Amino acid sequence: MGADGEKDRQAPPLKGRLLARLAVLIVRHAALVSFVCCVAGIVSLMLLPVLAKSVYVDENALLPGSARATFSHYDTLKAHDLAREIQTLLSSSTDPQKDFRKWLGDRLDALGADYYFHRFCPPTRSFSILGFLSTSHTYEAGKHCLVDGREQTPGVNAVGILRAHQGDGNEAIVLVTPFELENLTAENAIAMGLSLSLLDLLSRALWLAKDVVWVAADSKYEKYTAVAAWLKEYHEPLVSDSSFEGMHYTQDGNSSRDIFFKRAGSITAGFVLEFTRGAGATKVSSLEIHAEGSNGQMPNMDMISVVNLLVSWRQQFHLTLEGVPRIKDWQWLRSVGYVFEIVGKKAAELRKAFLSHAKASFTTAEDYVNGVSVLLRSCWNQMLGVPTGSHGAFRDFQLDAVTLEVVSTDLEHNMDFLTNFGRLIEGVLRSVNNLLEKFHQSLFLYIMVSPNKFVSISTYIIPFGLLLSNFPIQAAALCTSVKATPGSWTRAILVVILVETWSLGNAICPAILFHLFSSAPTRLAVWILLSGLCLAPVFCLRSDAHASDDWYVPLKSLTLGLTGIALGILSAVNFSVALAGALLLVPMCLSAQPFSSSWRALWKPKSGVISRVNAVLAPALTCFPLLVVLTILARESAGLWSFVELMWFWGSALYVSAFLVFLPCSILCLYIFFS
């Protein structure tokens, strides 16, 4: 008994043995496992529109549609009258800026709202390390703004605050209406008229428990800039008396006395109302939702769910999301949609046969194509990291906001649509007014595939995880298959450090060149020249390690390990960038090998099928990123520096990942291939 007990104590746990055997089995068949993971990852990625769930309201306190909207045709007629009044005023005035502010102040004063005029200047887009690490910019305005070396008049936001009759002034909802006074279109005038008509209605609402702040955002220097300037001063007030001098306009626009920045409570949510003229001869009006903020940040999904529920249940007009139009013409994608439709029908029939109460729902081919179109556009917007509207300024302060854009070719005569839209805004405001706390119940990590379908992180992380698993599997397989010398590992570590240092220098270089040269083509040329000269010594490194056919194994193992770790961390910052990186880098890293080795493997009689396929694909997959970069430099050299400057200004995760993940990984693979 004593000997048996001692053996039991010494034996490793069964679970540990099983995990060890499973790990050994995976590493032993790493090529097959990697192939299966790649195929499964791509297939599951294509299945995302099929696996999408219907949107739902997670916060019970919102109670969307629980009350009947009171916005009527009379309010729509009033909005039209106000729009015509604005257009008449601007066309007959000798000083449109002053007269419009006076007219708007009179209107807000008649509604019993506190109002003021906020003056701002656009921020200077300059390269600086601190500017990249923070999205907080300076919008302070004096009598003039310096824009591109020229003096310009500052932008002026008109702000009206309706104090809630039933509230304590601790919370507020923000409505934003962008406009451009110098180029005021009929759509802008209607948007302003409808907003004032809504404020008139809300000023008489007894159910209102939160203050309503209306911001007429001057889009002279972009819509985002106007809203961001107001939000920055709302949350970061100026404390010195001298800072207020000339910062705000009174009603006449000429008074020298200071008008202090007025505030309501903490902002619960924000809604941006935009009206644009659609292309084409059709008079069908639609409503588009824009939600992407800086670096792919999304608002709480309840914001979109409430709008979708009120549109589909109460107002019943066409709600859309921006997609990629060209994708809808791809016949192969439509064929894939038909395959998924057939499989979905069969699965629905089987589910109905075994579960009589189950709903026989499936994704049609048309829905699949539209879902892929919206999914790719949403991922592209999140990957760029640039907000798709002025709602992005709210996300910089961790506030939930969306842009509701009305697209129509005949807004002047589409009375029913405008009435329904006014009722929609009233219903949304009423739902947010019911909240007792900030949005927190629903998801923040999701991707929309249609106005009523979304893919949550629990679903879209699966294809990314399958693609990412190739890096540790292949790295472990390489380390166990070849016994590399300590000198090979030392050389591999040295090469990785040199390439990473070079990539970091490339990321910082634009900030230095911006202050040294005034011409964008000169900056770009010097940047490329310095990058090539600094990288050349790395490719000139040679040692006796090349005498072995497996000299590159330590370097490839390090490349796979570091790339996998970097992409995993990046997925927590911006998933779309990490997913694009995985799709690009997985085939390149797995196929990377010296050209001489791949050439010998192609003609070696004992080479397997996988080795021969890899030998054929390795040159194309390894050199593909280099060819893409050279093509972009050749065709888009004029706007490339502007794009880099834009990414730096927004502190985009795409910029960081491009220089600290994609670029070093591509250079290391090219180093292996050409050495």
Image (spheres, helix red, strand yellow):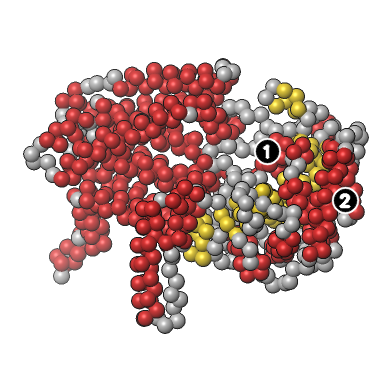
Q: Position of residue 357 (x, y in %)?
A: 45, 81
**Left or right of 125 on screen, residue 173:** right
- Residue in front for this viewpoint, 411 or 465: 411
Residue carrying label 2: 107
Amino acid under disc 2 = Arg
**Mark 2, secondary structure of its residue:** helix
- Residue in front for this viewpoint, 593 or 314: 314
Point 66% across, 35% down: residue: 137
Rendered view: 37 above or below 142: below
**Mark 1, secondary structure of its residue:** loop
Q: Quadrant of the C terminus?
A: top left
Point 63% across, 63% down: residue: 317
Point 56% across, 54% down: residue: 321
Point 61% across, 38% down: residue: 135
Rendered view: 541 above or below 300: above
Residue 308 visible (yes or no): yes
Q: Position of residue 225 (x, y in %)?
A: 68, 39
Q: Position of residue 487 (x, y in %)?
A: 23, 27
Q: Position of residue 341 (x, y in %)?
A: 39, 65
